[in-house]
Amino acid sequence: MIDFSVFQNSLPALQVVVPLLLAPVAVLVTIPFLSWLIALFGSIFCLYSSVSLFLLVSEFGKINYYMGGWLPPYGIEYIIDDASAFMIVLISLMGVFATVYAYQSFKSEINKKSQSKVYGMWLLALGGLLGLVTTGDAFNLFVFLEISSLSSVTLVALGSKNDKRALTAAFNYLLIGAVGATFYVIGVGLLYSITGTLNIADLTLKLSELTDNNSMKAGISFIIIGLMVKAAIFPLHIWLPSAYTFAPSAVAVLLTATATKAALYVLARILFTLLFNADEFTIIILQWVLLPASIVAIFFGTIRAVFEKNIRKLLAFSSLSQIGYITIGLTLGTASGVMASFIHIANHSMMKAALFMGVGAISIQLKKNIEVIDLQGLSRQMPITSSCITVVILSLLGIPLTIGFISKIYLLKAVFSHGNWPILFIIVLTSFLALGYAWKMIENIWMKEPVTTTINLKDDPKIYIPLIFLSIFNILFGIYAYPIVNAAFSASSAIFWKAV
Amino acid sequence: MAEFFINGFLVFLLAVIAIVAIQSIKVFSTVMLAGAYSLISAIIFVSLDAVDVAFTEAAVGAGLSTVLYIAAMKHLPKREKVVNDNTFFALVVCLVVGCLLVWASFDLPQIGDPMAPIHQHVGPYYITNTKTDMGIPNLVTGVLASYRGYDTLGETVVIFTAGLGVLLLLGDGRNNRDENE
Amino acid sequence: MIHGILGIWNYWIVIILMMTGLFIVISRHNLVKKMVGLTIFQTSVFLFYISLGKVQGGTAPILTGYKNTLYSNPLPHVLILTAIVVGVATTALGLALILRIKNEYGTIEENEIASFNTEENSK
């Protein structure tokens, strides 16, 4: 009995440490199937612990976990509140789906000898992201940022078996990511030098006593620039399109569903805890830096996606524009804006993960990077995959009864109550522009005859099972949106109201 | 005063190395310059009382990382093909970032000022409590291994990740060749 | 005012060093030189942190046993110990990638690789 309560109390640490410790085990097993089982066990354990933490938090409120028992600000603190619980549930849920999908993807896209190591890397990426969203210490955040970037870089580079461009994509990701992380470290150093603390809660308290301090403003700016690189916010997104395009299919699923989302969450957290004390400066950052960047990102991403032939690059550019919608919610500086962002973080992660899975199902069989013409006549060859892709594309467009519609509604509502008409117009306009690339895919799937390259494609149950689940989620939470909306509401209040 | 001049000279050396590193078209000498840069930084760390950091920087920064560079350079071209099409852009970025930092520096505490916030908050706690909590005289070890031991776990995971990554990237290449032969 | 400038001139030198590193990362096309630039950039950031920890007249943070000894702040040292190791890990992974790129493309000049990639894209 007593053991179990210790286990329960340590969940905030275990959900991060267990995947990190399982990683070497997965590497040492050397049998791909067993390593995959270990990775699956790790991700299911994360899901179990994050769901139980989520339930605990929503019942009893915030959990502060002190690493090694040292009180903050002297030791490192983990914070599970409504917002970080929302993120760990999302990350570990998508982690489970991606892991299920990964088996088939890695089997065909990666050499047999290195598969076990890849599952180790996979667990490191997952654990790194979970640590990133739960830590309450600014420097510990940097360490987890590096764990997750180094592991994602390696995973992207493994796409080189099919296409050597994966290597340059990975190198750019590494270099830009490292410069971004160094910017983050400079920012933390500047804030540390004027406050003497690294604990984010303590930092907020100390910074609120300072006004009009150059070091504080510069420090926060550097932190934001560093995180913008990781979250792929325009114009610091340059690593994203090729990384998503050339990575192995399962890696693209994991990155799109979790990595950028975790960085966006950390950015939101920093914006509304550290920044909100510096009034005028907050407005400058939100209105004159993030807002224009998100608007340009939306237009740039949508238009590039419309003219793109390579499907995964098309999806990557679409992600860029969707990240723009998420950051627009943040720039409003209102609780409903942050809530809209959270809803879209969750929904976009489900939509894009499903799309990358569906597209991956084709490229796994064709063993190449597929283009729009490779979708021709897909509905005859792979009816189940095609239907799922179509449902998710409709959701991406924001058709009623899908989660995409819920995202759009809450975003428009937030913008509307803020009274910012030009942005409202831009969101509606770009939603129609998105029809350009969505139609291109739907038309090829349903209205064209199969060509010789695609004639042998088949539905594969091992691949489409997670895809079906995600597509059902796309509809289910579109009709019964309460769970996501409610969780996003608590998450946004945890971030926002504490800040004001 | 002597310390001031020695530090001044070392920092001047760093600047010279960094500028030569931009200019040099021999990649190999750039790599060696990076090693020298780390080593001189290590000396400066000693004069700034950071002996543990100096030790690590000399061993890991100047030693291990130079070894890695040399091992890699064995298979890489030794000369750089100079193209200067990015220079203007790079200059603008560096000027903007540099000016932001200089602007920030006006509100930074003076170096060595014992009244600076970082010497008033958190830091003193370690100095007074490490002996009673851990029973060891080295404060850096105390903080590294216990108060912030979790960071160190993360650091270990980073090394493991990089090692596994190198193994996957390079070990993989060798396997490919074996399969082809 | 003069005292003020003297007190922060160290920061300016560190800033110049940082920017030199960043300049190399952005302006050079050779991938190894980019990594060297990154190393210089990061090492200069370490210098910034360590100079924060210095206390005038202080000694290294190892307890001497004498009362009233002034110690420099151990916390920045701890952070930089972690950061040095993270930096080397990044270097190692970057060099491994560069070796693979050399194998596949036959060059490590960014502009040449980019033109290879655009050819592939237009195929």
Image (cartoon, rainbow, N blue to C red):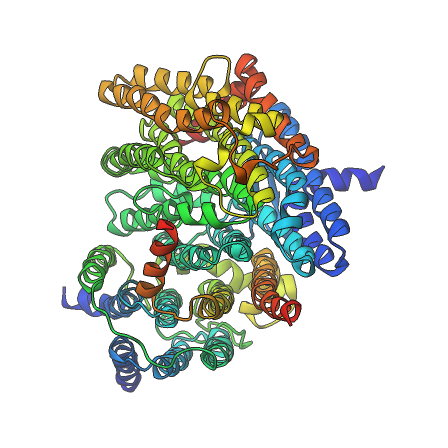
Give left or right: position of A366 versus B116: right
Q: Quadrant of residue B87?
A: bottom left
- Which residue is located at x 63 percent, y 68 percent? B180
Give left or right: position of A182 versus C2: right
- Which residue is located at x 36 percent, y 15 percent? A413
Give left or right: position of B120 versus A85: left
Q: x%, y% of residue B133?
A: 64, 61
Q: x%, y% of residue B7?
A: 30, 81
Residue at the right extreme of this rendering: A1
Front-most of residues A447 and A423: A447
User: Disc count in the image?
Assistant: 0
Give left or right: position of A305 versus B128: left
Front-most of residues A137 and A263: A263
Does residue C64 appear in this view? Answer: yes
Q: x%, y% of residue A463?
A: 65, 36
Does residue A193 appear in this view? Answer: no
Quarter of the picture containing the N terminus of chain A is top right
Quarter of the picture containing the C terminus of chain A is top left
